[in-house]
Image (cartoon, helix red, strand yellow):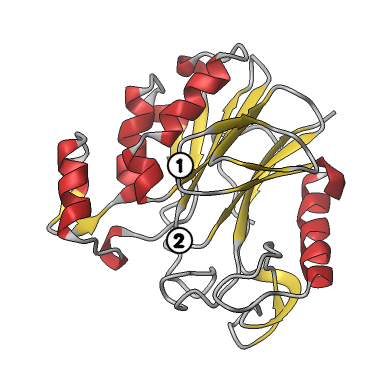
Amino acid sequence: MLRSPVLHAPHGFTTRFGGVSTGVYGATGSGSGGLNLDDRRIGGVQDDPVNVAENRRRVLDALGFEPDALALLSQVHGVDVAQARPGQRQQADAQVTDQPGVVLGILTADCYPVLLQDPQAGVIGAAHAGWKGTHARVAARTVEAMQGLGARPERIKAAVGPGISAGQYTVGADVAATFEAGGLGEHLNGLQLDLAAANVQILREAGLNAHNIWLSGRCTSEPEFYSHRRDAGRTGRMLALIGMSA
């Protein structure tokens, strides 16, 4: 797992290595040892749920948690922020909690995961930011929800994990125009869109200090990651995870 130096809570951004999945979910895309963490049927294929369960067990064990501590979301490229419920899959694109013993999970395969923590308030958050969520400022919505639990923006630390880089992400003219109109046009280079930088702008506008924001600098088109675009939808999912020990 990749980890950020700004977060103190147990956390990580998984790669495709270190699991038991095979085939398109394997560590090389056609082998074994893949760390796919999504058991849904996507792109006409579905991983063996037994393999996914073992992969999740390994990841959570590495962070010091049991599998039933994990709270997942049915992500729909929206801006709803849920109060985390371990063992349940709520429909939202971000979640927050102030409860110890809970791990927030965000599934990705090109969209950007954003993990957040106010260590003083004991509040954590996690958001899923594709182009729709980024444009709608889902990361700022997550900061607002954390404030409702006692967090303060100037104390919040944020880590933006691997996602599709601008050089690998060309959007349509309609999407580019939408970002221009939404005050995020500076992150366009022609029709190439830098979602990572756009999310940094959004976090700064939400009140976070620049030195509390970390970018992984990694692109999911790299072979270490699952990529929906690269693999035409026939691929697995990584998890971005952050928790608070009980």
Q: Is residue 77 left or right of residue 47?
A: left
Q: In which quadrant of the rendered view does residue 46 lie?
A: bottom right
Q: Is residue 140 left or right of residue 103?
A: left
Q: Position of residue 115 (x, y in %)?
A: 55, 38
- Distance from label 1 to label 2 (Cα)? 16 Å
Q: Secondary structure at mark 2?
A: loop
Q: Secondary structure at mark 1?
A: loop
Depth check, front residue: 238 or 155 = 238
Q: Position of residue 230 (x, y in %)?
A: 42, 75
Against 123, is 228 above or below? Answer: below
Which of the two discs, 1 and 2, labels the residue nearer the N terminus? 1
Q: Residue at x 38, y 19 (%)?
A: 207
Q: Position of residue 197 (x, y in %)?
A: 31, 44
Mark 1 belongs to which amino acid?
Gly
Q: Are marks 1 and 2 in contact (CB under 8 Å)?
A: no
Q: In which quadrant of the rendered view does residue 71 lie?
A: top right
Q: In which quadrant of the rendered view does residue 59 lie?
A: bottom right
Read off the residue under disc 2: 110
Read off the residue under disc 1: 78
Q: Quadrant of the N terminus?
A: bottom right
Q: Is residue 80 left or right of residue 57?
A: left
Q: Quadrant of the C terminus?
A: top right
Please tell me the numbered disc located at residue 120: none
